[in-house]
């Protein structure tokens, strides 16, 4: 058993060595070739959602039939689909925004909106599936501004919230001509939050002095390490209140029917409750909205992907290969010896 285990260890070591040498050679080749600037352009991904669903539905409908009957049945269904009116010029474009604290997807959203503005024509619609609990004001302000570009172009914009659109996420959602939400989607949280941990007393206790030198009365009103003065705290709270007022004035502009006195208090509601407050227009999932699209209308899911650098892909490959080898070695080591 020990001999077999040693063989496996030596085999794994050889594999690691080979993978490392290959990786090093590829890195040298990549550096010698140098990646051209064009290689870093985003990749456009377009999916025909309507065709994908049609093909899957046809396959599922024929799944229980005998092979000969299945082929004939699929042929009949496809012929029926082809007879549907496909002459309509109207299209539905679908964008997805899955936001984080920094609103990082806004860079892709900006390019996607710019792309759509070049191709949308009369009769087209845009569905934007927003999922975000909010985050940095400037990031979500920019994201909402991107959706505003679409809205002001005249194309009908529907925002779908299947899970959550709160705080900055709701700022984005409010731009839509129509907002739909799942029954238990989280909606609202029209407020501003800032958390500022302060370690000043802890530093004093351990004998560490920390000072901040500034020019300008309000250059640094709060700090994690320096003592926060009463005046600094007051000014920082004023900034939060001003930001809240900007948030409310933006909502009043894009969705004037909202009673902000009742809803702009930082609270959130589920879809059914949000409907009562006028925060959404219909209780409907994005799937049901797409199902309402007339047959024959192209439904195009558009996404721009930033390319993964070749060095990073190579690193991922080496890492995955090493993990597989290690798993195989551990697998064999745990097996009982053959008789």
Image (tube, grey):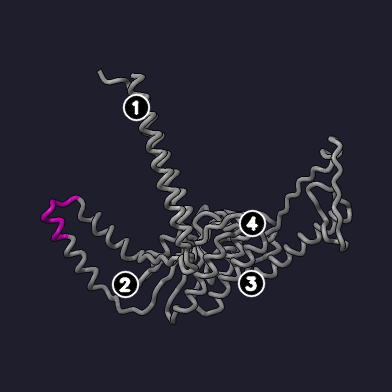
Whether residues under marks 4 and 1 lie with C-beta atoms below 8 angstroms apart, the answer is no
Residue 333 versus residue 253 in the image, above or below: above
Q: Quadrant of residue 240?
A: bottom right
Per the image, is 106 magenta? no
In the depicted view, which residue is nearer to us: 218 or 176? Answer: 218
Drawn side of residue 145 relative to residue 51, left or right: right
- Does 268 sit left or right of 306 as displayed? right
The residue that mark 3 highlights is 256
Quarter of the figure with the C terminus:
top left
- Would you place residue 282 above or below residue 228 in this image? below
Q: Nearer the viewer, mark 3 or mark 1?
A: 1
Q: Is there a contact, CB below 8 Å, between mark 4 and mark 3?
A: no
Mark 4: secondary structure: loop
Which quadrant does the N terminus fall into?
A: top left
Q: Quick one: 3 or 235, which is closer to the camera?
A: 3
Q: Which residues are magenta?
A: 64-73
Q: Give the distance between the C-alpha atoms of the residues marked 4 and 1, in whole angstroms.
A: 54 Å
Q: Which residue is drawn at the image coordinates 32% and 20% (left, top)?
A: 336
- Choose the circle earlier in sequence order: 3 or 2: 3
**The residue tagged with tag 3: helix, strand or loop?**
loop
The x, y position of residue 125, in whole percent, is 45, 73
The residue at which mark 4 appears reads as 135
Crowdedness near tag 2: few (<14), some (14–19) or many (≥20) residues, C-alpha within 10 Å: some
Is there a contact, CB below 8 Å, between mark 3 and mark 1? no
Residue 55 in picture, x, y percent from top left:
27, 61
Q: Is residue 102 left or right of residue 287?
A: right
The label on residue 296 is 2
Q: CA distance from mark 3 to mark 2?
A: 35 Å
Q: Which residue is mark 1?
A: 7
Q: In the rendered picture of this protein, how many numbered marks are placed on residues?
A: 4
């Amino acid at each position: 058993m020990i001999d077999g285990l040693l063989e496996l260890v030596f085999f794994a070591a050889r594999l690691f060595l080979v993978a490392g040498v290959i990786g090093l050679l590829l890195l040298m080749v990549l550096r010698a070739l140098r990646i051209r600037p064009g290689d870093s352009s985003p990749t456009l991904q377009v999916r025909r959602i309507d065709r994908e669903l049609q093909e899957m539905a046809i396959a599922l409908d024929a799944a229980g039939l005998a092979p000969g009957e299945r082929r004939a049945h699929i042929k009949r269904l496809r012929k029926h689909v082809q007879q549907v009116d496909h002459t309509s010029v109207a299209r539905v474009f679908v964008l997805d925004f899955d936001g984080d604290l920094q609103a990082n997807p806004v860079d892709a959203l900006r390019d996607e909106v710019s792309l759509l503005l070049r191709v949308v024509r009369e009769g087209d619609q845009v569905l934007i599936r927003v999922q975000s609990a909010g985050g940095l004001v400037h990031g979500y302000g920019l994201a909402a501004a991107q959706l505003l570009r679409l809205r002001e172009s005249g194309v009908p914009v529907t925002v779908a919230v299947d899970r959550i659109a709160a705080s900055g996420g709701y700022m984005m959602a409010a731009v839509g001509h129509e907002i739909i939400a799942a029954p238990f989607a989280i909606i609202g949280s029209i407020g501003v939050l800032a958390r500022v941990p302060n370690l000043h007393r802890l530093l004093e206790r351990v004998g560490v002095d920390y000072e901040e030198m500034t020019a300008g009365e309000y250059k640094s009103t709060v700090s994690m390490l320096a003592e926060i003065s009463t005046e600094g705290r007051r000014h920082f709270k004023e900034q939060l209140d001003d930001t809240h007022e900007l948030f409310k004035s933006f909502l009043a502009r894009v969705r004037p029917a909202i009673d902000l006195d009742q809803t702009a208090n930082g609270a959130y509601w589920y879809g059914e409750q949000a409907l009562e407050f006028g925060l959404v227009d219909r209780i409907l999932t994005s799937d049901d909205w797409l199902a309402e699209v007339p047959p024959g209308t192209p439904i195009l899911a558009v996404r721009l992907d930033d390319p993964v650098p070749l060095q990073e892909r190579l690193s991922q490959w080496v890492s995955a290969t090493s993990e597989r080898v290690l798993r195989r070695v551990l697998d064999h080591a745990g097996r009982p010896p053959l008789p």
